[in-house]
Amino acid sequence: MAKLEVCDLGFSIENKRILDNINLCIEENKFVGLIGPNGCGKSTLLKNIYRIYKPHVGAVYLNKVDIGKIRSKEVAKNMSVVFQENNHQFEFTVKEIVLMGRYAHKGILDNNTKQDEEMALRSLEKVGLKDFYNRSFLSLSGGEKQRVLVARALTQNAKMIILDEPTNHLDIRYQLEIMDIISDLQVTAFAAIHDFNIASNYCDYLYVMEEGKIKYHGETKEILTSQMFEEVFGVKSYVFKNPFTNKIQISFYSKSSDK
Amino acid sequence: MKKISLLLIVVLMIAFTGCSSNEAPKPVDEEIKNVEVNDEELQEEKTYKPVTFNYDIYDNNYEVIFEKAPERAVTLSQFMTEMLLALGLEDRMVGTAYMDNEIYPEFKEAYESIPILSDKYPAKEVLFSVEPDFVSGWRSAFNEKRVASASEMMENGMNPYLAISIGGDGSLETVYEDFRDLGKIFEVEEKAEEVISKMQTEIKSIQDKVGNVSDEEMIKVFAYDSGENEPFAVAGGGISGDILRQAKAKNIFDDIKKGYATVSWEEVVERNPDMIVIVDYGDTDYDTKLNFLKQHPALKGLNAVKEERFVKIGLADMSPGIRNVKAIEELAKGFYPEKFE
Amino acid sequence: MKNLDNKLYSALLYMTLSIGLIFSIIASISLGAVRLDFNDVWKIIANKMFLNNIFQNTWNISTENIVWNLRFPRTILAIIAGSGLSICGIMMQALTKNPLANPYILGISSGASTGAVMVIIFGGSRLFALQSVSFGAFIGALFTSLLVFVLARKNGVFSSTRLVLTGVSVAALFSSITSFLIFTAKEVSKVREALFWMTGSLAGAKWDRLLWPALWLLVCYLFLIIFSRGLNSLLLGEGAATTLGVNTKFFKNAILFLGSILTGFVVSMTGVIGFVGLIVPHISRTLVGSDHRKVAALSIFIGPILLIWADVLARILARPEEIPIGIITAFLGSPFFIWLIRKSSYSFGGKDG
């Protein structure tokens, strides 16, 4: 039973086809990665899935329900998202930001309960920011902000989590920690990832995009081959297995160093 | 806790506004009570003939009825102040405001005996504090954000009065009519007729001195009020335009049936006035305007500029009232100096 | 970084503000163009409030008139307008996600001016039976917001940017219509009148005009309080709000509807008073952060206090004449605002990184 299904999705911006005939199937509790060169439409696809954009053709189904036809709150109960946000102007505390994750579960007149606050604290603990509870969000560094947003997504407590290049600003340590947190949770995850080694370490299944279409998809070890990298990314690679983790690792080199 | 106190304040506010809808006290009633006399005495008194006016002020039409002679008059413009003083009504005036030029010398003493409410328009509460029953002035005063609206005045026992002469069809004749109306309102009809006769006599004497002026001999005049990019000129309708006519001049913008109009320098040049009248607002205003006109490139070719044929007239003189006599005299002397030697 | 959650800080703040507001109300009724005896003032209020003549009438009718029919409603109007403009400011800032938004950003003030000027120049009774300049302003305000609403929509939604741009264009259009009307007006006095109306003043305050605006203000305030969560998330961006489950369409429509009517009410009663709707939300946010619940609660104290004092100054600085209040709010507002920006501990345009 697929948790998230994308069927025949197409999307255009000003008559230019950005996404064409996208079909995706993400199984429950799997960690699925989305990779592809810049401009291939990864971000646009994710935006169609988490409803910032409305697909022009096709639909997105979450738990067999067409999410284009239900309320945002319903969707948010079942799907949380982590992406680069752009708020530079409105001051909130870390606590306030994280507690926004509880919105989907609250009625109009409900207040934040002790339970909600505990969930928030626990999420912050998971991302290593427990002491930042009362700090100003805008005063944090880029990486800290990103981790707070992850904590917010955790607080949302949805069974599916989508990550749109979530680890851009982070030190390697935190990149790995966040990926650890996500994979330890009993959730379905779909993430756009640019670091292939991380993709290899955490994802069970991969989708490769090129020019608005799904080019390849399959189990990670079958997708991450040097032919694929040469074909889609235009780069030479050495693919090997990491003796400690038993996972595929990739090392890149340019044509000129191929002696 | 804070939300409750907040809501309480708001609810209280609403309760106030809801309950306090028609709260205007009625001072006039109280005054009338004091005036009640028994029937016999009433029959001996001359009965007052109520005077009714209909005014169109901005958004509304108002019917104003004077049922007794006012005793607490306020004048919010120079011309009204002088009109009432000309009728000798200083004892019935409780406040004046908004002078343009110096008070007419003849009325100086009387003027100084009346409280001056402000230089320009007084705040509403200042007006209310003198409890007037008659308020007059230019139309702009009758606005809730300037002094007070006509409705506000009437709700508080003040009758507004707008002279006919302030409108676009004002003229010397309407000035006489205004004096007659004021005569009726204040029960000084005889004095009003005196004032009118005096004005008529004096104007006739000036006009006789000028004598008959044929169309060709008539001096063509451009009466400049203000404006740099476009001149704001005295036009054909209105009291100011009529004053020029009475001084036997031909206003080059006579054809525009308004009191004042924004015209163009081109038109001024094309209509080629013989003389230029400058309306003076006081202080250095005349000199500034004179220099501006003399140096204006478009006007250099005009005879009026080349030969420096300028005539000065004060703003107050161009407003309706007894000054109009002086205005006509000064202008006539300026236009036809040879007739006054 | 101070602890914004501190309950003690909060209690102190509200207590100070409540006292401040009461003091301001007292000042507003006691001070004015005419010097009145303070004792008389308070006896009059007491008599009226308790609907009983508790105190012997030792004052002029005009004093009572001034206190009860001029100054008191004017003070209430200052409270309504001060709160109203602040609440509108908060709403527009949420709608456009821009802390520099003000209540007039969607062209409402231009539309109101056009409506008012039309009545001034053509006369209300001839113009669709508009009863007064105020009503004309109100209709004008609603008309422009409806226009912006219709024009800014694309596929049933509007982005904040498109809203602002449409608002700016509509504002420009109506400003030019107003200018045109003014320049072609036949009577000079009407021109001056029209220009004066637009400057803004509380002198039009009357008891019977305050009820509906006060009620609408209450509705808007409650909206901000009840829906504060959704509004908070809205500030973070369309994407963040949607993914958190906020129905952004509902919120934008609601804000537009509630806010434009509120601005319409305020502008129709006071003309265009600037600055208040911009700085009050800022002051509030500097003190308590951006949670709408807190910002709204604080603003309905700060807004009235600000406007009451601006009005007091407008009435006494040049007495017996009155300075248009818009001049005071701008004159005092600008330096204060600049000081606030420089001092503020939160990043205005984004810290680096």
Image: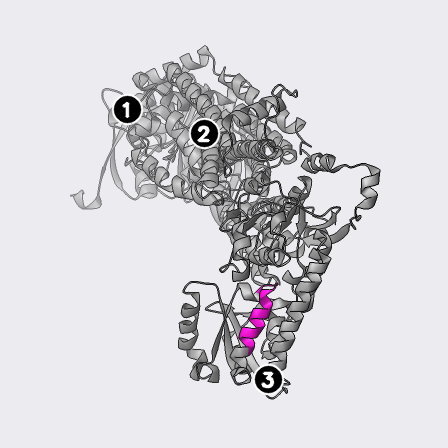
Q: CA distance from mark 3 to mark 1?
A: 97 Å
Q: Quadrant of the C terminus of chain A?
A: top left
Boundaries of the magenta span:
B319-332
* Helix, strand or loop for disc 3: loop
Chain letter for mark 2, please: C
Image side of residue A7 versus residue C348, left or right: right
Q: The disc numbered 1 marks a residue on which chain?
A: A
Q: Give residue B218's mark.
A: 3
Circle 1 Cα neighbour tier, 10 Å, few/some/many (<14 / 14–19 / ≥20) = some
From the image, tell me which residue sits under label 1. A174
**Percent from the top left, x then y, of residue B241?**
61, 71
Q: Residue at x 55, y 84 (%)?
A: B339
Can residue B8 be seen here? The reply is yes
Q: Are marks 3 and 1 on the same chain?
A: no
The residue labelled by disc 2 is: C302
Residue type indicated by callout 3: Met
Q: Residue at x 21, y 43 (%)?
A: A254
Q: Chain of mark 3?
A: B
The answer as to whether the residues below labels 2 and 3 share one chain is no
Q: Is residue A54 left or right of residue C318?
A: right
